[in-house]
Amino acid sequence: MNGEPELDSKSLAKMENQDEPNPEAQQSGPSFKNATLSWVEAGSKDDNGFRLHDLNVECPYGKLTVVTGAIGTGKSSFLMGLLEEMHLLEGEVYMPRAAGIAIATQTPWLQQASIKDNILFGSDFVESRYQDVLESCALIQDLDNYEAGDLTEIGEKGKPRLGCESLQLSMFLKLTYIQGITLSGGQKARLSLARAVYSRAQTVLLDDVFSALDAGTSKVVFEKCIKGDILSGRTVVLVTHQIHLVSKAASKIILLEDGKIISDTTPEALPIEIMEVLDEAVETKADAEEEAKLADEEIALAQEDSNPDNTVKKDKKPAAKLVLEEERAIGRVPKTLVFKYMQSFGGIGIVIILLLFTLIDEGASILSTLFIGLWADAYSKPGEVNVNWWLTMYAVVLLGTTVTSVGTYLCWYIATWLSARRLHNQLAKAVLFSPVRFFDTTPVGRILNRFSKDVK
């Protein structure tokens, strides 16, 4: 919202791959003190006037803080401001970084790697913690749908596909390709949440992680993850509209309006009229309660399934490789490839004309050398040498050589330019009309190389 830039992989890695929380670290949560922030420098041409202003709040250490408000009021900017991704115009911003920071953004960022690697994100693998995270983020039953389980590779492309994620259905839609899968929006959101939760960071920032989930799935994730042991004792700042779901567990609720905090209080002290306004942005309470009941049943079943006595581990097949290694030709260029390239000049007629021009150019070069030899040989014979005649003839030969050389190079230049244009058009047409699976199995960089270096 409001044009916030997305965090790249280096920023995420720097924040999430931290050491164990330091118990000796100063135990104070993220805070603003009389702060005003903007996405651009004040007075610049890109300044649209949006500000987070008059911020004076502290998120309790080791507890859950909920940030809510209408769309466009600056909730995501609130988190980015804590991360110092915005320009601080005045005031102070404090973010405890010694014990690490993890974030799950509203637009999930995933690596082109296996599901397991996306969750670990470079952290050490701990089996018990890893299983707890999968269960907390409602991923265990979903991974059972894939032969390779959490070793299944995820495609790097594909817009998040928003849709219903009912717990009665598989939460992982089987968008299976020959070498891997593409996840929907809700699946990406939960996987991004799992990565943040698995990290050892003391401070966890969650930007509207429930937006792509239905009420039932949100209930499961909230009960087992946000309220669960996996985040117990950690400072969690959660942006969400679903106040009716999270209010009971929140230590503080911050309400934003036009970039300003209009309410900063405990859930018990939050005015009823504000709760009613916020509930308009989500499903009705009746539907939510019905979904919650179904979710409670799913939680009970999941707890039974997670019992070590009832757990039966499935044998995983080798990881399904989504993107294969790029094929490279080794050795001499095949003659058939040379002929195909020459055909792209415009046909056999154009090739013959180019060969004729090349032969004429070479012949003119040989003729100039031969003429110099004849001129020198004329001095070895008796009689006077007509220098003016030889100079005139040599000038004619040089002029002819220059004309044939320029003509030859010009013809080759035009032919190669037309050939490159035809090949580029064929390549563009082939890529644009390729099936969707091609874009899931081919990295962007490989395609760009074909359009740039390989066309030169």
Image: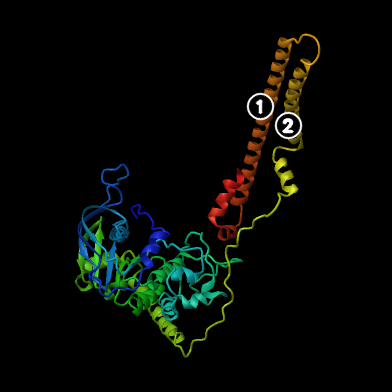
Of callouts 1 and 2, which one flags the residue occurring earlier in the amino acid sequence?
A: 2
Q: Is residue 63 above or below residue 379?
A: below
* Residue 186 shows in the view: yes
Residue 152, horizontal then vertical, whole percent: 54, 70
The residue at which mark 1 appears reads as: 406
The image quarter containing residue 317 is: bottom right
User: Which quarter of the rendering shows the N terminus?
Assistant: bottom left
Kind of residue sitting beneath label 1: Val
Q: Is residue 141 above or below residue 258?
A: below
The residue at which mark 2 appears reads as: 358
Q: Is residue 182 above or below residue 379?
A: below
The image quarter containing residue 94 is: bottom left
* Residue situated furthest right in the rendering: 382
Kind of residue sitting beneath label 2: Thr
Which element type, helix, strand or loop, lies under badge 1? helix
Question: Which one is in front, 359 or 286?
Answer: 359
User: Which quarter of the rendering shows the C terminus?
Assistant: top right
Q: Which residue is located at x 41 percent, y 60 percent? A: 10
Which element type, helix, strand or loop, lies under badge 2? helix
**Neighbour class for label 2 at 10 Å: few (<14), some, many (≥20)?**
some
Q: Which residue is located at x 61 percent, y 47 percent? A: 454
Q: Which residue is located at x 23 percent, y 59 percent? A: 93
Residue 314, horizontal then vertical, whole percent: 55, 82
Question: Is residue 159 toward the left or the right of residue 207 in the image?
Answer: right
Q: Is residue 329 above or below residue 219?
A: above
Residue 82, horizontal then vertical, whole percent: 28, 61
